[in-house]
Structures are given as structure tokens and as C-alpha cells.
Image (cartoon, rainbow, N blue to C red):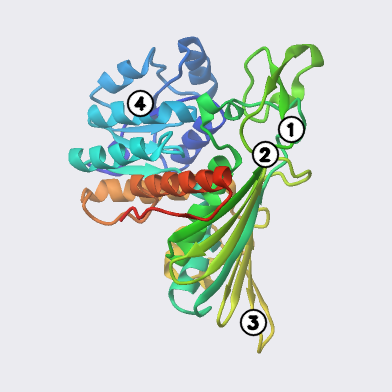
Amino acid sequence: MSTQNFNIGVVGTGFIGPAHIEGLRRLGFQISGIVDIDPATARQKATELRVDRAYDSLEEMLADSSIHVVHITTPNYLHYPHVKAALEAGKHVVCEKPLAMNSTQSAELVKLAAARGLANAVNFNIRFYPLAHQSRALVQSGEIGKPYIIQGSYLQDWLLYDTDWNWRLEPELGGDMRAVADIGSHWLDLVTFITGLRIERVCADFATFIPARKKPTKAIDTFGGKLLKPEDYVEQPIHTEDYATVLLRFENGARGALTVSQVSAGRKNRLFFEIDGSKSSLVWDSERPNELFIGHRERPNELLFKDPSLLAPEARRIASYPGGHNEGFPDTFKQLYSTFYRYLNAGDFTARPDFPAFADGHYELVLGEAILQSAREQKWIDVPATH
């Protein structure tokens, strides 16, 4: 089957669903249909996004034998049942993170996908900045020496005020963790991808600075709460973290620390890491994604600007534009899907994937559960092995 013959269905039409659609269209794929929990919303979004068909239900989409791949972009609590249904219907699946609400569910999905022989991916798109791949190449080649310290943060300000609201604030919809699960998981996936190192132990500290928020009385999109008036709210207690810092011990003896926050004024979407090795260091900031700082002791430091001609082959493969032509957040979706559909087109699903698969999503849930346990018990927790 050629790449042009894949028929794709997208489940969920909120903030991230259209991002999937845009990334797929930039690769030349046509979206065969979309579905939402509300059929009227699906029809409206189909018109806005110029998608030919809006299904009345997920069941209707999955019963359509012409659909080969399903992208799951629904709220967290729906990922497990939606992914399971899609796999049982014989569809290849790309799922937003988290893969499920807990590691028991995610382990089941890993096994089910393998038993059905279906390609699968989790949308850890941040891996697919060219300089993230370049960082991995530098670490894996030994260019920076043995990693000693792996530290950084993921900071946002979209939940800074008590009038800011999103479904992720409700544990029954988003899970028992919020900042760590929503954005910390991206950071953790990225640094384990770059270094190739698993995390063995964690010690976490959480804080909820806004114990009660004003929940809108009508539905809003992600990042859409700034448009509401005071009379549009009701007060709601909050039981998930606004902030967390997690100490990390990696399998090679490296140490690390991660801070996540959704209440850091002025930080719109800033993922930052620094990896200090025995020879050199690497520093990267997602708000300046086309620059990589390479630190040295015995010679001048370097600032590498994204330029395919200067990158390692694996990084060059996901850089579409020449030096001086910046690539950003939307490009990461395109590059992840390009990699996934190239794998799908090759047809050997026993081959090791070069993108984040369900096994990676399962690992992040196991890691997240250890972090949550540590925060609750206020002590170091061992991370169970997943391979």
C-alpha cells in the first residue's frame, strides 16, 4: 500500500485534533473523516476544517472498512477505551499522550497492538524538533562524554489565574496528576530519548497554589478561558498540582531534576533542558527551537543554528527547510507523522520503531505513577522496569 492510499480518521476536534490534521495535510494525506462526542460539533468542525465526512459516532468510524489509521485526540479519560476499540477493529493507531489513565491499561494496549500486528504511536511530538534529534546524535556518539547531570523545566502560564479553566483540571477527565502528566511527560520522554537512559528512582514535591478555581458554566476550548466574564463561572476545588519538582536518578549514575509549572507568568510554552557531560554540555529551549548551545571548558562555546547541512543524518532527515528558515511546533507533528507513515508503509511492524510507540507511552505512565507515589509519600520511589 502506498502512502497516498492511507485513509485516516481523526477522533476529537478540540485544540490538538486540528493540529494532527494540519500536520497530515502538509504531508499530502487526505483526512477521510472526523468524529466528536457531539455529532453536531463534528459536523461544524468538518465544515471549518474542510473534511468531507463527519461520523455520528466512533463506532460508525471504526465500522468503516476503508479507514486504515485512527488518530485519537480526545480527553485523557477516553484514550484507553478509544484506542482499545480501534485496535480491536483492526486499525493502526496514533494516540495523544497519555496513552491511558494508568499503567495497567497501557500495558494491555501494548500487548493488544502486538497481538493484532498493528502499528502504533504516542504523540510525543517534541522529539521531532531537528535539534532534539541532533542532541541525541551528539550524546549517543559520545561527543559530550558520559552524561552527569540532566536537568531542566517545562513552564507555562495558561493556568496562572483562578479564572483559568480546562478539563485537565478535573481528575476524572485528566487523571490524578496534571502538570507532570500534561507537560512533564514531554520533558521526561525527550531527555530519555536523547540520552537513551531510563530513570531508576524519583523524589517529587508537588504544590497546588490555587486551591479553588472558577469553572465556566459553558464549554470552552483549551486556552480559551481568557474570553469569559465573571458571571460565567462557578467555584470548583482543585486536587491536582500546579507545580512539581522531581529529583531523578538515571541508570548510569547520572543525576537530574525537573521542574514543571502551569502558573509561571510569561512562560507560554517553554521546555528547557541542560545535559552536562564529562566533555561538553548541551542546552536547548523550545521557545528558541532552532538554536542549540554546546558548552566547552577548553575552547569557546558554540551556538549551533539549525541548518540541515550541519546536522547529523538522523537530524537532517527531519529538517525540511534550509538554514535560516525556522521550524517550530507545527513542524514536529508533520515530522512525527512522516516517520510513522514511512514505517507503516514499509509494513514490517516487528521492526524497532523510530518514533514514540505504545511501549514509550506505557513507560511514561509507569514513571508518572512512581512520581505521584513519591509526592504523596514524600520519599524516594524506585521506578519499576518495563523491559
Left or right: where does residue 20 sit relative to residue 376?
left
**Pointer 2 residue:** 242
Q: Which numbered disc covers residue 296?
A: 3
**Nearer mark to the viewer, of 4 and 2:** 2
Task: Give the CA separation, mark 2 to mark 3.
Answer: 35 Å
Query: Element under label 1?
Result: loop
Query: Which label sits in the foreground, 4 or 1?
Result: 1
Element type where label 3 sits in the image: loop
Residue contact at pointers 1 and 2, CB within 8 angstroms: yes
Residue drawn at point x = 24 percent, y = 41 percent: 111
Quadrant of the rendering where the N terminus is positioned: top left
User: Around disc 2, counting alpha carbons within 10 Å, would you say few (fewer than 14), some (14 to 19), or many (20 or more)?
Assistant: many
The amino acid on which the numbered mark 1 sits, given as a three-letter code, is Ile
Sequence-wise, the earlier of marks 2 and 3 is 2
Q: Nearer the viewer, residue 202 or 195?
A: 202
Cα–Cα span, label 4 and label 1 = 32 Å
State if disc 1 and disc 4 touch (CB < 8 Å). Answer: no
> Mark 1 Cα within 10 Å, few/some/many (few <14, many 20+)?
some
**Pair 1/3: label in front:** 1
Name the kind of residue labelled 4 in the image. Pro
Q: Identify the secondary structure beneath mark 4.
A: helix
Residue position marked by numbered label 1 in the rendering: 210
Q: Quadrant of the C terminus?
A: bottom left
Above/below status of 288 relative to 17: below
Q: Which mark is residue 37?
A: none
Q: Which mark is residue 81?
A: 4
Per the model, the C-alpha gap separating discs 1 and 2 is 8 Å
